[in-house]
Amino acid sequence: MLPVSMAYWFLPFAAPIAVWVAWSDMKFMRIPNRAVLALAAVYLLVGPVALPFTLWLWGWALLALVLAIGFVASGLHMVGAGDAKFAAAMAPFFVGSDLPVVLVLFSACLVAAFVTHRTLKHLPAFRRATPDWESWTRKEFPMGLALAATLIFYLVAVILLH
């Protein structure tokens, strides 16, 4: 886990962007590039205050690595391009973390997001409240929901577990 001070610095800025991503992906099946750039900007501007400089620099290396992997995965049609870009923008927030812990958290968020999305899709009251959400009628799953949840829950967990 990262220093708790990091989570306190990042959470107020990253959480609204993550919620925006989840909503946009469910409504439009698209993660806006502006959201990806906004999250990267949070890391750029807040990171030097929240993290030791060397760790902050490693975060950028992690972003580049995840972006490269994401582009390959997107090119192979394994994930959407927006998902790959948002995952890359999220990556620096996990710098210094225990990879298996992050992967278990992502797996749990993915299963929970999928079950929740597919359940709400069949509830008439919820569908009436969100009739124009494209994700209700598409075969693809809005992965931004799971990615956003992973980022938010990770930062909250860092705060609560310290």
Image (cartoon, grey):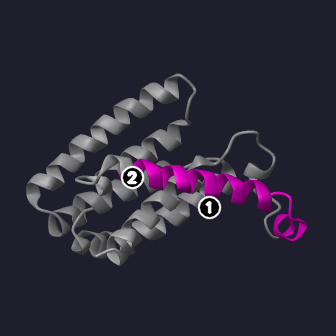
- The residue labelled by disc 1 is 23
Residue drawn where x is 18% and y is 47% of the image: 58
Locate residue 8: give its quadrant.
Answer: bottom left
Answer whether residue 106 is magenta in the image: yes
C-alpha distance separating marks 2 and 1:
22 Å
Give how far across and how far down residue 88 sits, in percent. 38, 44
Q: Amino acid at mark 2?
A: Val
- Determine if residue 34 is in view: no
Q: Which mark is residue 32?
A: none
Q: Secondary structure at mark 2?
A: helix
Please state the extent of the stretch shown in magenta in the rendering: 101-128
| Image position of 53 (left or right of 79) | left
Q: Secondary structure at mark 1?
A: helix
- To which residue does mark 2 refer? 102
Q: Quadrant of residue 52?
A: bottom left
Which residue is pictured at 22% across the width and 74% down the height? 5
Question: At which x and y percent is residue 121?
Answer: 81, 57
In this view of the protein, can residue 121 be seen by the observer? yes
Can you give x and y, in whole percent of width and height, for residue 40 in the image? Answer: 33, 54
Residue 53 image point, x, y percent: 9, 58
Name the quarter where the C terminus is drawn: bottom left
Residue type for callout 1? Trp
Residue 23 versus residue 100: which sits nearer the camera? Answer: 100
Q: Is residue 52 above or below residue 66?
A: below
